[in-house]
Image: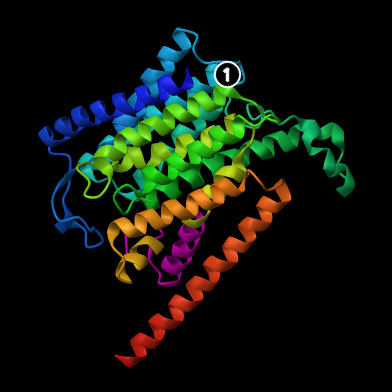
Amino acid sequence: MITLYFFSSIVVCAVLTFVVRRIMIRQHILDIPHKHKRKRHKRATPLGGGLAMYMTCLVVLCIGYVVGAIPGAHISQDVLFGVFAGGAILMFGGFLDDKYNLSPKYQIIFPVLASCVAMFFGLGVESAGISPERFAFLRFVGTDVGDMSQWVVAGNIIVFFWLMGMMYTTKFLDGLDGLVTGIVAIGGIMVAVVSMQPQWFQPEVTFVAMVFVGSCIGFLFWNFHRAKIFLGEGGSLFTGFFIAALAIISGSKIATTLLVMAVPIFDLIRVIFVRLKKGKSIFSGDREHLHFKIVQAGFSHTQTVIFFYGIAALFGVSVLFLQSHQKLLALCVLFILMLLFGMVYAKRRSNNTNKT
């Protein structure tokens, strides 16, 4: 049954992307490269492709619920409704930004609203199956276990920043054709695989994850190099929002998602520090991201994207063999490697500048 809905979502998204592309062209909602120096494409390309992914997930999952095809009851319908309500906000805000090019102070309103709406409908530590008793280790630091409710509140604050962080990771990562869509698809696959392990066995999570993966693959037919349509603002945010929500819904598989998305996340942190050091806005577009650096080093567009896919898949597969503390160690090792890369690159850039 999961296989049927997976392939259905591929076909549905591919068809919807065709429709959305035609609409965006007629509405003249295009990404015109000469307006932005950081753009690598040569011709005007339609935006708003994320709408096709959103509609695919919404329609296919609604059909699945109506006909009773989604197994189990781990995922609350209220929580899933909240996720799609939040997604609708992102689609609306993305449309406005793609059409009118909103400033960052207005762009951030929609991710904040989307996160709040999703959490209002139950997306949080409770939906992840994390009860106050899970914080019992705090006894050892003198915390009154009777006041564990405050830690649930703290946990939900972390959930909010997790959602925001993942949305802006995919938003900033969306610089090469197919890069974001492919990496979040790998993340969805890993959540699906882990959810089918005996110690978890959440077939309903696997169902939702594979529908999302199918929508990513369907969109990739149009978005891989050379892309005929881009995700747009709403799509780049929705992909991060959905994979982040899925990590919570699936029983706090945040470590799994973190490992798959580790390189983009650490790269985002590095770029933010670089921009702050230069006195620039953290939202300003540039070519400081790792994927741009790899292309500038002489690798092709496709080679760079495949490299990122490989890293995401490698760390994703590692979650099947690592315990929780080992996953944390893997993240620390990757962080150190990214830090060393940043230092080496900065030194080479400084030497090249001095020579000229």
Q: Is residue 27 left or right of residue 291?
A: left
Magenta segment includes 239: no
The part of the image, by quadrant, that contains residue 18 is top left
Q: Is residue 159 left or right of residue 220?
A: right
The part of the image, by quadrant, that contains residue 274 is bottom left
Picture residue at 40% right of the left edge, 84% below the top: 350
> 23 or 96: which is nearer to us?
23
| Region rendered in magenta | 265-289
Picture residue at 58% right of the left edge, 29% below the top: 249
- Residue 349 in picture, x, y percent from top left: 39, 81
> 10 or 268: which is nearer to us?
10
Query: Where is 47 relative to 85, above or below?
Result: below
> 262 or 299: which is nearer to us?
299
Picture residue at 24% right of the left edge, 46% below the top: 101
Magenta segment includes 286: yes
Regarding residue 261, the answer to whether it shows in the image is no
- Residue 170 in picture, x, y percent from top left: 41, 47
Query: Where is 166 relative to 134, above or below?
Result: below
- Residue 336 in picture, x, y percent from top left: 59, 67
- Residue 260 in picture, x, y percent from top left: 52, 48
Query: Where is 84 relative to 238, above or below?
Result: above
Image quadrant containing the C terminus:
bottom left
Q: Which residue is mark 1?
A: 76
Regarding residue 54, the answer to whether it shows in the image is yes
Secondary-structure class at tag 1: loop
Residue extending farthest to the top is 67
